[in-house]
Image (spheres, rainbow, N blue to C red):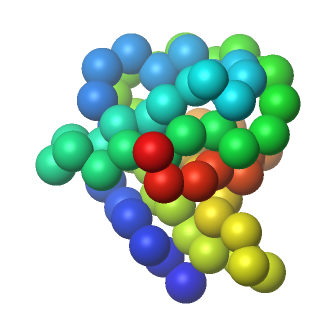
């Protein structure tokens, strides 16, 4: 089930740590919920947050992996 979908604001530099916040155009913000490091650079990539098995997962266009997030 897709919760949020659209374009991330600014430069996206991948997944880092639990301090990392991802902001969609329109103001919706999601914070990385677990430590997972993967560098990937994209400027304003398309992304979506989906609910999978009771958790929210951020999927970013161009990346093969996703990361667990929570509302920020």
Q: Residue at x 83, y 30 (%)?
A: 36
Image spot of residue 53 (x, y percent): 78, 81
User: Where is residue 61 drawn, in percent x and y?
Assistant: 53, 44
Residue 10 visible from this viewpoint: yes
Please determine whether, in this image, residue 2 is positioned above or below residue 69.
Answer: below
Question: Eyeballing the image, is 54 above or below 58?
Answer: below
On screen, residue 37 versus residue 52, left or right, reads right
Residue 25 appears at what percent x and percent y? 21, 42
**Nearest the eye: 45 or 17:** 17
- In this picture, residue 25 sits left or right of residue 2: left
Q: Nearer the viewer, residue 25 or 30?
A: 30
Quarter of the rendering containing residue 5: bottom left
- Quadrant housing the N terminus: bottom right
Say which residue appears at 69% left-offset and 29% top-offset: 18
Residue drawn at (81%, 22%), measured in percent from left and top? 37
Who's the residue at 71% across and 44% down the image?
Answer: 33
Tell me which corner region of the image, top left, top right, bottom left or bottom right, holds residue 13: top right
Q: Viewer-proximal residue, 67 or 71?
A: 71
On the picture, is 70 further left or further right than 16? left
């Amino acid at each position: 089930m897709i919760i949020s979908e659209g374009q991330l604001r600014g430069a996206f530099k991948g997944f880092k740590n639990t301090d990392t916040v991802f902001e969609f155009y329109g103001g919706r913000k999601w914070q990385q919920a677990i430590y997972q490091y993967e560098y990937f650079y994209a400027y304003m990539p398309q992304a979506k947050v989906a609910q999978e098995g009771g958790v929210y997962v951020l999927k970013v266009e161009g990346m093969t992996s996703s990361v667990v997030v929570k509302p920020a």
